[in-house]
Amino acid sequence: MSSEPVPGLRAQRLTVRTTRAAILALLGVTWCFAEDASKGDPEMLPYAGSDEWRADHEQRVKWFREARFGMFIHLGLYSGAGGYWPPDRTIGRLYEQPQTERIRTWASVPEPEYGRLLKPLFNPEPGCTDAWAELAKEAGMRYAVFTAKHHEGYTLFNSKAEYSAHNPATGSTNISPPGRDLFREYTDSFRREGLVPGAYYSLIDWQYPDPARYRRYLHQHLAELASGYGPLGILWVDYSSAGNEGAHWGTRSILDIWRTHQPAAIFNNRFWNGLENPNGDFFTPERYVPPAGYHGRIFEACHTLNESFGFSYHDDSWKGPADVIRLLSDVASKGGNLLLNVGPDARGRIPDPAVRTLKEVGAWLRTHGEAIYGTTASPLLYPPFKGRITLSADERDPTLYCHLSEWPEGGLLSVEGLQTQCSSATLLGGGFLPLDQTQGGPPVIRLPATPPDPTDPLPIVAIRLNGPPVFDSSPYPRQAADRSIALSASQAILAPSVTATNPIRLEESHIGFWSDTGESVWFPFVLRVPWTTRMVGDKAEKIPGKFDVYLDAAIAPDAGGEVEIRLLDQTLNHRLAATAHWRDFQEIKVGTVTVGQAGLMSLHVRPLSIKGIGLMNLRGVKLVPVP
């Protein structure tokens, strides 16, 4: 995998902040944000000079847009080390870095020692690829990408390239067991299960000795993969860097080879530098999810089930089914795919915790899959409830799917901003739900007071529409059915040095690393019904509404300070008291505001003083109407 997720993430954040600058301007707030200066490689764009490539682009990516969920498989000699060097847990040193596939780098191991010690340990069992394919299908995955060659330079396909077949340093780069070709076994297994196989290939090589001849070697490998293993859905290359991208690899020649042998294949953007560069058929955020979708572009977020791509003896940071389901929901709501990694051991066995999680994810998808597969991105950047939204792509049956990461208080689910009339609402895996909707107003769905199935990690309500979805023009967070406003960290506009995390567990997203009292955070939102009403004779009189303001925050014992919360012309000051630690989030009431006008507004949070090592981790702000 790429060792440069941070530069890609930085570019992504700058892009978001540039967009947010426009929002701030609407709110009357002045701030300067840097712009994303990333550019494409016009001479090496995949479709440059080829009408044929452009003409069938939508046809080639159609299956990928619909698939949404794939399996990434990292297997190599590094699998036998599992994070130890020498590769023996009784005498070897444990390297705690999460990317065990980089053990050669962590332990500074030269050839031929690396191959000499690891080749005897590498013995994938016959039928292991069948087990992978069966698990992927049971998990609800629709395709896979397998490491034909990783950075270590060893090939899991039987290459006939001169250096791969025989060389004086390692003997051979081909490491399939005698008489077998692991890449062929993989493609055959996944096709039998009806899944689309793809090939991962590292553009860099830690063992090939001659940089001047490497490009020819690279091209021969990729030609062998393109021509020798039947239809492949994806060429997934890794990785490029500044000055080593595009023309450096002879990318156009490689694409011409693949166009000849794999005319239906798609490929990622990593022939070029930057995880979000605009080349290729899709871009590839790694270990993070873009905070918003990218109109007209396709992305695939790759993540791991623990912290390592390769097999690890010591990494027990396993994601549970709920983590994966919510991650998949988040990615799909932004129009992307999730490529989820498993790291088999040197015998080809996927660790039991990964197997258990994937099977449970598959069970959930058998009930809720219509809200994931073949859907399009949420038409609302900020849902009016805690969760995500996807939209069916079938214009004959327009359906809005509400993914509920938190059960609505009182069981009332409102989709503020939706103006299309709705015909019905259903809890997937349950039954029909009562639906109220005035002409042109938002639907309000009446759910049970508590979830009918408390074991469901992500309940989904499907709202069938009478026509194409039409929303009002506001993209900002809105009131829930009970008139409250919940503003999460992911919706905030940040001053440059304030940091918003984007972890796998979405409920842990927060804002932290406040560096000084000049740093501010803005939460834009739309207040549609700020007031309450009372009857004066036979007339209804509007009364400005009161809202209690809560910070969802965690403060370490040696941290804290004083914050100012400003809304319209009202200011609340509050001194933060410590919670147990940085992850002990509590709802802290900071005061009450009165609002008598409707419309777009912004709640502003800034520190007046910072105590000790930091201010707070802020997970969100909530405005609760006072009865």
Image: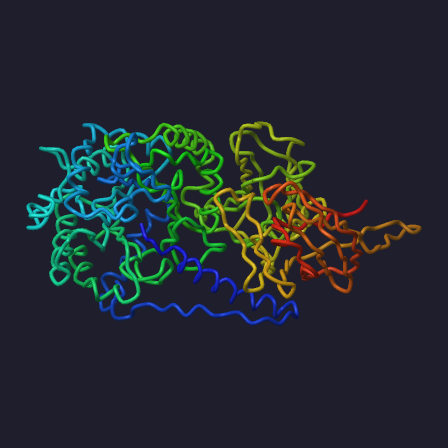
- x then y, percent, for residue 212: 12, 63
- Is 485 drawn above or below residue 358 in the view shown? below
The image quadrant where one finds the C terminus is top right
Question: Which quadrant of the figure has residue 278?
Answer: bottom left
| Residue 133 in view of the camera | no
- Return the x and y of residue 200 as percentages of the image width and height: 25, 47
In the rendered image, the vertical position of residue 74 relative to residue 6, given as above or below: above
Seen in the picture, residue 316 relative to 538 is either above or below; the reply is: above
Q: Residue 592 location, x and y as percent?
A: 79, 52
339 on left or right of 220: right
Q: Nearer the viewer, residue 346 or 407?
A: 346
- Where does the image place residue 133, in percent across and percent down from the top left? 28, 33
Left or right of residue 275: residue 232: left
Q: Residue furthest right?
A: 537
Q: Say which of 351 and 122 sits in front.
A: 122
Q: Is residue 353 visible?
A: yes
